[in-house]
Image: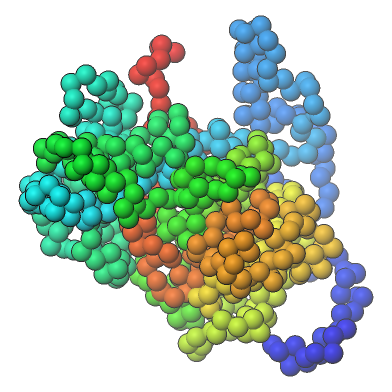
Amino acid sequence: MSGKKDLAFEKKRVAKESEYSYELSAIAKKFLPTEKNRLIFKTMKKIFGVDPMTGIDVSMYKRGGFRQLRSKREFAEWGRKIAKERKLPGYNRAVGIPLGQRALEPYLISGTNIIVDYDDLHHVNNAALQQMLDDIKRTVILNLDIAHRVLQVRAGKEITPETVNLYLETAQHTIGGGAVAQEHMAEIHPGLTSDAYCKIITGSDELMDMLDRRFVIDIDKQYHPERAEALKRAIGNTMFLVARVPTIAVRIGDGGVVYRWAAMQSSMAFISAYRLTGESIISDIAYAAKSAQLIQMGERTWYSRARSQNEPGGIPFGYISDIIQCFRDLPPRRFIEIISEDLEEGRKYLHRMAEGIGTIANVLDELIWYGFYMSGGLGFSTGVAAGGYCGEVVTDFVDSVSELMHRYMRGVKKVPPKWDTVRWILEVSIQIMMETYEKYPSLMEFHWGGAHRISVVGNLAGNTAAMLTGSTTVGLQGVHYAIGLLMKEGWLRTGWAGQEVQDHVGLAYSTALRMEEGGLVELRGPNYPFASYTAGHSAGLTGTCVSAAMARGSSWACSPVVNAAFADPHLKFDFAKPSLAIAKAALRQFMPAGERDLISPSH
C-alpha cells in the first residue's frame, strides 16, 4: 500500500489480493455481445476458425501436422528435390520436433484483408521486405549548392539551367555504371542497374521551374498542400540531389559503398557536364560530392556491433519516422484537436500511424537489425515483427485507445509533457490491452511469445503518451513504464523480451543526454550502447517520434529533406502503403530490383 495520493483520482490506492485472483476470460463471456463487435473478435475467428474466446482446442493433434500449411508442403517437396539433385540432404521435416499438433495459423495482413502463410512473411521469403531495406540502404543525399560554388569559384564555370539539367541527365547515365570521361572503362549492363537514378529536392518554386521535371521529386504533387508548404519552407532555396545507387550494389557490398558510389558517379557527371580538367579542381569537386553536407541514412555502428554507414543499426529513429510516408496526404493538424472533435478522423490518423510503425519500424528494427544482423535468428523475429502489422490486433487496440482519448480530451487544448498528467491514460490504455490478451486465448496463441505482447502493449502505451504531449521523452518513459513495471507487475513476468537491461534503466535514462545513456530520441538508433538488442523495443522508440510529430501537427519528425526523399514514386517499395506491398510479395506479385537473370543461364 502506498500512502501517497493518486494524482489522477485524488485518493489513496490499495492493492487487494482479490485484484489478482480472477479469470478474465470467464468474466468477459458475460459481455459477449459487446466483444463480438470488436475487430479483434472477428479477426481471430477468421484466422483460427473457432470461437476466439474458447480455452479448449478440440482439434489438437488432428490437424495433419506440418501439412496444414501450403508453404510447409511446398518446402517438404523442395527438400526432397534438392536432396536428390545434390546428393546431400537439406530441408527435411523428419528431423527436429514434429510440427502441427497446434494450429499453424495463417496471417491476415492488417488493412488488406489478405491472408498469407506465416512463412511468406519471413524476410528471405518476401521480396518486398528485402526491397524496403534495400531502398533505404541505397539512398544518399548530396547538397549541390556547395558543388556549384566550387565550380564557380575554383573552375570559373557558369551555373545555368542548361548546365544543371545536362549534369542531371549525365548523372542518370553514370549512377547506373555508365562511363563518360575515359575510353577504356568497363561498364555495367544497364539491365542490372535499371533501378538506379538521381532526383532533385528543393523548396524553391523558382528553381523547380528551371529544372527538367523528370529529375525532380515534386513535393506539391506528393503531399497534402499544407504539408507541402511546410516542407518547402523548411528546405528553402537549397538543391539536394537524392542518389539511388542500384540495389545490386548493396547486395554485393553493404551500406558503406553507397556514398562512395554516389560520390564517384556524381563527380564523373560534373567532370563531363562542365568539361573539367586538373587534379586540384576535380579533388575539390569530389570532396564536395562525397563529404560536404552529405546526408547518409545511417552512421557507422560501434565496434562490438560494427557495421558500415547506411546499415539499419545506425539509422536514427527520427529518420525512420521520416521514411514512413503513410501520413503525407493528410493535413498536418495537432492530433489532440482532431481526436477531440472527430473520432473517425482521429482514427484515420491513428490507423496510418499504426501501419507505418507496425510495418517499416518493426521490420527494420526488430526483424532485420535485431533478428538478422545481431542475433542471426531465422524465424522468431518474424513473429515479433508480424505482430505489429498482422491480425488487426494493433488496429483494434488503437480504436479502443482512440475512444478513451475522444471521451476525455474534449475541450483540452494542450496536454503538458508531465508524468503525472499522462500517467492515468497510460495505465488505462495498458490495462485495456493486457486484459484483451487475457480475454482471448486465441490472441495469446497468435502472439505466442512475451516479445510479441510486450512490443505491442509497450509501444502503443509510449505512442499514446507522445501523441498527447508532442514529447518523445514522455513517450519513451511510457514505453519503459509499461514494459518494465506495469506488465511485470500484472503478469509477474514478460518473458525474455521484458527482462533486458533497457527496461531496468530505461526510465532513469529517459531524460539523459549523455551519449552512452541515451540522447534525444529522434537522434538515437537501435545501436545506442545501454540498449541490448532485444525484440520488441526499438519500434516503439520510432513510434514515439512519429506520434510526437503527429501531436505537434508537424510535417516531419526529424529531417524535412529525408522525409521528402522518400516521397518518390520511382522507388520500388511503396513507403506510403507498406502493408499492401508486403502482402503483394507474399502472393508473389511484387517485382524487386537487383535480380541477376540477365547474367544467369536460363532457368
Q: Quadrant of residue 278?
A: top left
Q: Nearer the viewer, residue 249 or 515?
A: 515
Q: Is residue 406 above or below residue 398?
A: below
User: Could you tell me which quadrant the N terminus lies in?
Assistant: bottom right
Q: Is residue 57 above or below residue 221?
A: above
Q: Residue furthest bottom?
A: 10
Q: Nearer the viewer, residue 72 or 204?
A: 204
In the shown orientation, is residue 369 left or right of residue 446?
left
Q: Give percent across and percent down for residue 42.
A: 63, 55
Name which residue lies at 84% across and 90% down.
3
In the shown orientation, is residue 546 left or right of residue 445?
left
In the shown orientation, is residue 250 left or right of residue 84?
left
Name which residue lies at 40% across and 71% down.
554
Q: Give percent across and percent down for residue 491.
A: 82, 63
Q: Nearer the viewer, residue 79 or 306?
A: 306
Name which residue lies at 44% across and 13% down.
603
Q: Is residue 213 above or below residue 177?
A: below
Q: Quadrant of residue 557?
A: bottom left
Name which residue lies at 72% across and 29% down.
66
Q: Specify whether residue 373 is in view.
A: yes
Q: Give percent across and percent down for residue 469.
A: 53, 78
Q: Is residue 126 above or below residue 74?
A: below
In the shown orientation, is residue 437 left or right of residue 304?
right
Q: Give percent across and percent down for residue 376.
A: 65, 37
Figure colour scheme: rainbow
Q: Specify whether residue 582 is in view.
A: no
Q: How many marks?
A: 0
